[in-house]
């Protein structure tokens, strides 16, 4: 199966962003307000959102294609450059009416002190063009990943799922928000614990959680529902089956981007022909590795299978 990774073709569609990190030293408190003064000495830029999913897929030696929207600006150009460096075939529609989403994180003493977000919603004309490109790309992929970060890039997600189903392509969705009806008939949905609680409500024990998960799975017509549960690991719910994987994280350094690594690993493993339960086991292993790294990071093939 490992030798087949390079033959897997995954199409990723969703919201992309540029993750910027300002690293610096903190040695005093500002005289202007009770906040630390950070003297920046290093800047890093990494692709985020759906771009990070595609980057994780490429790191596992699979073929990643990315379809998304950016602004016609410096940050959009930078994302395109980073995708090329990571070996991702990216088609990024440039919308001059918006600014590319940027998440700026200020890091001092290896701790995140502040995050600043810049974002706007893409135009309907650009999104319609992206849908047409999606239809053209479907025949050339084995698996579809729809990475929803709630930034407006997946306005047509219901139609995209319908088209993937009609083409016989498994479609994995990383959801956002409290309206999951738009994800109906996806193959696999991967909410985290907080996102699932927002939709299904709280639970008191495992039995109640299982009941809520199965009810949602049936309501949406999903083949599988994977709830990622941070330090509790992750749980897969399918018809008549509950599979729980304990966390494999040795040390949790940064959880940002872990969901991207999970859905990327799932997509590649399913594209190789793995059973969903085996794909979940490997995704859990990948999550345990990536949370030990700072920021939006990747897990490569050697780390996962070594």
Image: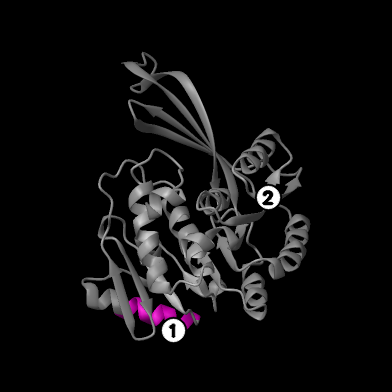
Q: Is residue 7 left or right of residue 191?
A: right
Disc 1 secondary structure class? helix
Check the image and report above or below for 175 versus 205: above
Which one is in front in this view, the residue at disc 2 or the one at disc 1?
A: 2
The secondary structure making up most of the magenta span is helix
Disc nearer the start of the sequence (2/1): 2
At which x and y percent is residue 175?
49, 63
**Along the viewing direction, whichever of 34 and 93 lies nearer the viewer:** 93
Q: Which numbered disc covers residue 90?
A: 2
Check the image and report above or below for 192 versus 103: below
The image quarter containing residue 218 is bottom left
Q: Which numbered disc covers residue 218?
A: 1
**Along the viewing direction, whichever of 57 and 6 lies nearer the viewer:** 6
| In magenta stretch: residue 219 | yes
Residue placed furthest toward the front: 3
| In magenta stretch: residue 160 | no
Residue at 54% x, 53% y is 61
Residue at 39% x, 48% y is 303
Q: Which numbered disc covers residue 126?
A: none
Residue at 37% x, 40% y is 293
Disc 2 secondary structure class? strand
**Along the viewing direction, whichever of 223 and 266 lies nearer the viewer:** 266
Give, as a single range, the part of the protein colored magenta: 211-220
Q: Is residue 277 left or right of residue 134?
A: left
Render colour scheme: one colour
């Amino acid at each position: 199966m490992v030798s087949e990774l390079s033959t897997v073709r995954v199409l990723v569609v969703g919201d992309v962003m540029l993750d910027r990190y300002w690293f610096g030293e903190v040695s005093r408190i500002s005289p202007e307000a009770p906040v630390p003064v950070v003297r920046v000495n290093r800047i890093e830029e990494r692709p985020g959102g759906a771009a990070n999913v595609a980057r994780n897929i490429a790191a596992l030696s699979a073929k990643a294609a990315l379809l998304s929207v950016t602004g016609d600006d410096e940050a959009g150009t930078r994302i395109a450059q980073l995708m090329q460096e990571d070996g991702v075939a990216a088609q990024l529609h440039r919308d001059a009416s918006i600014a590319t989403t940027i998440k700026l994180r200020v890091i001092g003493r290896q701790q995140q002190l502040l995050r600043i977000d810049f974002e706007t919603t893409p135009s309907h004309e650009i999104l319609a063009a992206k849908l047409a490109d999606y239809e053209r790309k479907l025949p050339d992929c084995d698996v579809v990943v729809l990475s929803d970060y709630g930034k407006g890039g997946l306005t047509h997600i219901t139609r995209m799922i319908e088209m993937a189903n009609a083409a016989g392509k498994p479609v994995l969705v990383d959801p956002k928000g409290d309206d999951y009806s738009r994800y109906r008939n996806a193959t696999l949905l991967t909410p985290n614990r907080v996102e699932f609680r927002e939709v299904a409500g709280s639970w008191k024990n495992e039995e109640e959680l299982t009941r809520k998960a199965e009810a949602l799975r049936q309501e949406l017509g999903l083949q599988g529902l994977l709830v990622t549960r941070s330090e509790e690991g992750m749980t897969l719910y399918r018809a008549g089956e509950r599979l729980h994987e304990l966390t494999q994280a040795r040390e949790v350094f940064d959880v940002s981007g872990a969901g991207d690594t999970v859905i990327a690993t799932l997509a590649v493993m399913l594209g190789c022909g793995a059973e969903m339960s085996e794909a979940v086991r490997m995704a859990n292993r990948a999550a345990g590795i990536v949370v030990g790294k700072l920021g939006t990071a990747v897990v490569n093939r050697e780390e996962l299978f070594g």
